[in-house]
Image (cartoon, rainbow, N blue to C red):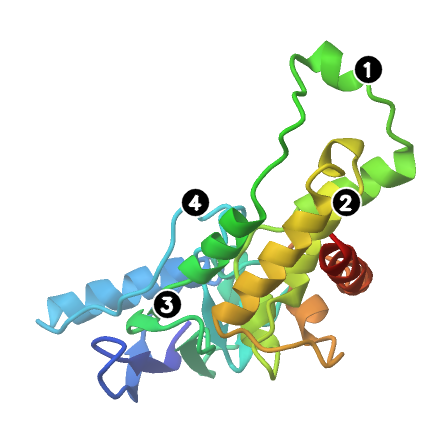
Amino acid sequence: MNLKLKVWRQKNAQSEGKIVDYEAQNIPADASFLEMLDILNEQLQAKGEEPVVFDHDCREGICGACSLTINGIAHGPSATTTCQLYMRHFKDGQTIFIEPFRARAFPVVRDLMVNRSALDRIQRAGGFITARVGSAQDANSILVPKKDADRAMEAAACIQCGACVASCPNASAMLFVGAKVTHFASLPQGQPERQQRVLQMVRKMDEEGFGNCSNHYECEAVCPANIPISVIGQLNRDYPAALVKDSVV
């Protein structure tokens, strides 16, 4: 496959970026999108040009580091992370626009790499549980209804990639925060800190500059972990209840 690439190049968060045209030649249809960028970089280095900087780690769809916007879609035209997107989804000779995730809370580090550490800070603000779960036998002694266990597991599948933020017109992180809140709220071990957790995570989310949810549903559409938008409903129920309890206390 021979492709026409329009790639965002930017030296750092302070400099102005621009779209640069490249020709990617002899790309195998079975190559992943990141492998295609590897081939492009090899071609650029052979010409003495600087390679395109992009982020990645596992290349197995579980870390969420490969945060690219492809033809205007976070992670590209498939329900996967970018590293699991294969070139057979594109046509020979096609023009592909490649940009970093766009959000004020995700400043550009360089080219296609963004800093998503704001999500880590929200996660830390929520903390973990203080209940001692002990060994597997002790943990299993706490009976959890299957529907609650399934809901917790569904929410825990979030890989913190930030595609929900990049796809939202408001750059909202509420799908991510809702998933983290729902995960613990669905289990008995998460109840002692439930009120404190949701308050701290929402406050940190606002502090980091993320927008609010206005029900565009774009976040759910691009989520590679298939997190349902119902977790935002859980967040919207828990937060005002926690505010009332906090004000009373």
Q: How far apart, in angstroms, are the residues tagged by discs 1 and 3? A: 43 Å
Q: Residue drawn at (43%, 45%), measured in percent from left and top?
A: 58
Q: Secondary structure at mark 4?
A: loop
* Mark 4 vs 2: CB contact within 8 A: no
> Circle 3 sits on which residue?
114
Q: Report how far apart the C-alphas of labels 3 and 2 lie in the structure.
A: 30 Å
Instruction: Specify the quadrant of the image occupied by residue 246.
Output: bottom right
| Quadrant of the rendered image containing residue 205 | bottom right
Depth check, mark 4 against mark 1: the one in front is 1
Label 2 crowd bin: few (<14), some (14–19), many (20+), radius 10 Å: many
Question: What number is the disc on residue 58?
Answer: 4
**Which residue is rendered at x = 50% and y = 45% of the image?**
60
In the image: residue 23, left or right of residue 243: left
Q: Nearer the viewer, mark 1 or mark 3?
A: 1
Q: Amino acid at mark 4?
A: Cys
- Residue at 34% across, 80% down: 7
Observer-nearest of 17 and 4: 17
Residue kind at label 3, given as amino acid type: Val
Residue annotated with mark 2: 185
The answer to whether 120 appears left or right of 225 in the picture is left
Mark 4 residue crowding within 10 angstroms, few (<14) / some (14–19) / many (20+): few
Along the polypeptide, which appears first: circle 3 or circle 4?
4
Measuring from the top left, give residue 88's x and y in whole percent. Answer: 54, 66
Vertical arrangement, residue 58 with respect to residue 43, above or below: above
Q: To which residue does mark 1 refer?
A: 141
Instruction: Give the SS element for disc 2.
Output: helix
Q: Amino acid at mark 2?
A: Ala
Q: Earlier in the sequence, mark 4 or mark 1?
A: 4
Mark 1 vs mark 2: which is more N-terminal? 1
Residue 199 in percent (x, y) is at 65, 57
